[in-house]
Image (cartoon, rainbow, N blue to C red):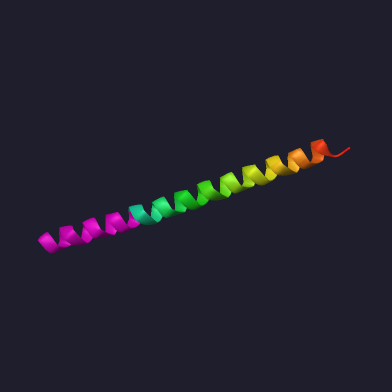
Amino acid sequence: MQEMRTFFHAAVVAHLEGAQMLVEDALLQIVLNISSVSSLYDYFTKCP
């Protein structure tokens, strides 16, 4: 029974770490997209 609980705990921890990596990846992509969009916007607004 104890090793089953340990295995379950390890699986949950691994799942949470994977989900956290996915969330951080998504946030990074969003930040990069926002910064590229704003730099494009600056580029077009500063063009004569």
User: In this view of the protein, which residue sits in the foreground, 13 or 42?
Assistant: 42
The answer to whether residue 14 is visible is: yes
Magenta stretch prevailing secondary structure: helix
In which quadrant of the rendered image does the N terminus lie? bottom left
User: In this view of the protein, which residue sits in the foreground, 21 or 15?
Assistant: 21
Tell me which residue sits at (28%, 55%) in the image: 12
Residue 31, by quadrant, is top right
Q: Which residues are magenta?
A: 1-15
Residue 37, by quadrant, is top right
Question: Going by the image, does 42 lie left or right of 30?
Answer: right
Residue 30, by quadrant, is top right
Question: Going by the image, does 35 lie left or right of 25?
Answer: right
User: In this view of the protein, which residue sits in the foreground, 16 or 34?
Assistant: 34
Give the tally of numbered discs. 0
Image coords of residue 6 (percent x, y): 17, 60
The answer to whether residue 1 is visible is: no
Image coords of residue 48 (percent x, y): 89, 37
Check if residue 22 falls in the magenta segment. Answer: no
Image coords of residue 36 (percent x, y): 67, 46
Tell me which residue sits at (45%, 53%) in the image: 22
